């Protein structure tokens, strides 16, 4: 009798496949406040690759990815401004400006470009309050001018320059974010661990899975749109 394979175990949940709650104690979002604000702290968050800056604007305190070169006590502006770290509406952006933490829809708090060291470029302004943004992969996306973004480049660039000397370092890094690591090929597993396992001939035999089968039961299978001879 086999046992639950990895994809099934992850879907079932449990302590081994669950993100520690302490990793997500800081929620990245934009404030409702408009006007001057101040950076009151720069903190480390286990759930984010970049450091976060704790900002106070009026009576509101919020967290966003830290800007490269920002320091505690620096003044920024929410709703306008030209200094790195300020939060602006894309309709007020200047072409060729570097931005990050971009809202996909107005008011969603920032969904794109949140990785350490990354940034996008304001490409051009279009009709009907639309803004074209050039992403790091050189693809252009179009969003509303009412969306917000932060000026500058995210801090933390160079985090991938230092190698993980030991496997334990990578293990704890992936454990923090509940990422599957190490990744192993199915045919290299034992027969008890995967349908493609065992060394008795590495002949993968995909089968037809039920359309309503859960992800764990579909592993190694295909799901064509239809089967049988075309009539």
Image (tube, grey):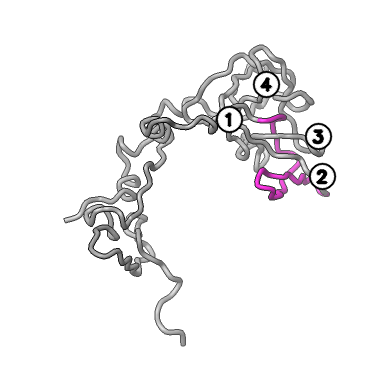
User: Residue 103, percent across and down?
Assistant: 65, 39
Secondary structure of the residue carrying tag 2 is strand
Could you say where residue 106 lies in the image, as x and y percent from the top left?
68, 39
Pick whichever of labels 1 and 4 is earlier in the sequence.
4
Magenta residues (range): 127-153
Q: Mark 2 or mark 4, which is nearer the start of the sequence?
A: 4
Which of discs 2 and 1 lies nearer the camera? The answer is 1
Question: Does residue 143 belong to the magenta stretch?
Answer: yes
Dots 2, 1 in contact, CB < 8 A: no
Residue 196 image label: none
- Residue 92 tag number: 3
Q: State the CA–CA distance, disc 3 to disc 4.
A: 23 Å
Asked whether the residues under the numbered discs 1 and 3 touch, taking CB atoms below 8 Å apart as contact, a structural biologist would say no
Disc marking residue 158: 1
Q: CA distance from mark 2 to mark 1?
A: 32 Å
Q: Disc 1 or 3, which lies upstream in sequence? A: 3
Which one is in front, 23 or 56?
Answer: 23
Front position among marks 4 and 2 = 4
**Are there few (<14), some (14-19), or many (20+) residues within 10 Å of tag 2?**
some
For marks 3 and 2 on the same chain, the one whose residue lies earlier in the sequence: 3
Residue placed under numbered mark 2 in the picture? 125
Q: Which mark is residue 69?
A: 4
SS category of the residue bearing label 4: loop
Q: Name the residue rendered at 72%, 45% in the picture.
A: 134
């Amino acid at each position: 009798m086999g046992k639950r394979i990895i994809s099934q175990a992850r879907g079932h949940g449990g302590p081994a496949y669950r993100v520690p709650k302490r990793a997500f104690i800081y929620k990245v979002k934009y404030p409702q406040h408009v006007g001057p604000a101040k950076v009151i702290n720069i903190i480390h968050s286990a759930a984010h690759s970049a450091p976060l800056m704790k900002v106070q604007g009026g009576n509101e305190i919020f967290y966003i990815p830290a800007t490269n070169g920002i320091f505690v006590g620096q003044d920024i502006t929410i709703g306008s401004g030209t200094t790195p770290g300020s939060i602006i509406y894309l309709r007020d952006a200047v072409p060729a400006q570097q931005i990050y933490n971009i809202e996909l829809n107005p008011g969603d708090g920032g969904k794109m470009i949140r990785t350490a060291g990354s940034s996008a470029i304001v490409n051009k302004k279009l009709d009907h309050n639309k803004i074209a943004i050039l992403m790091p992969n050189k693809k252009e996306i179009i969003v509303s001018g009412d969306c917000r973004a932060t000026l500058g480049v995210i801090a933390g660039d160079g985090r991938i320059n230092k190698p993980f000397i030991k496997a334990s370092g990578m293990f704890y890094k992936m454990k923090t974010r509940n990422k599957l690591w190490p990744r192993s090929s199915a045919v290299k597993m034992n027969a008890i661990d995967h349908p493609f396992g065992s060394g008795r001939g590495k002949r993968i035999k995909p089968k037809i899975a039920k359309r309503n089968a859960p992800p764990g039961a579909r592993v190694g299978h295909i799901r064509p749109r239809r089967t049988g001879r075309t009539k």
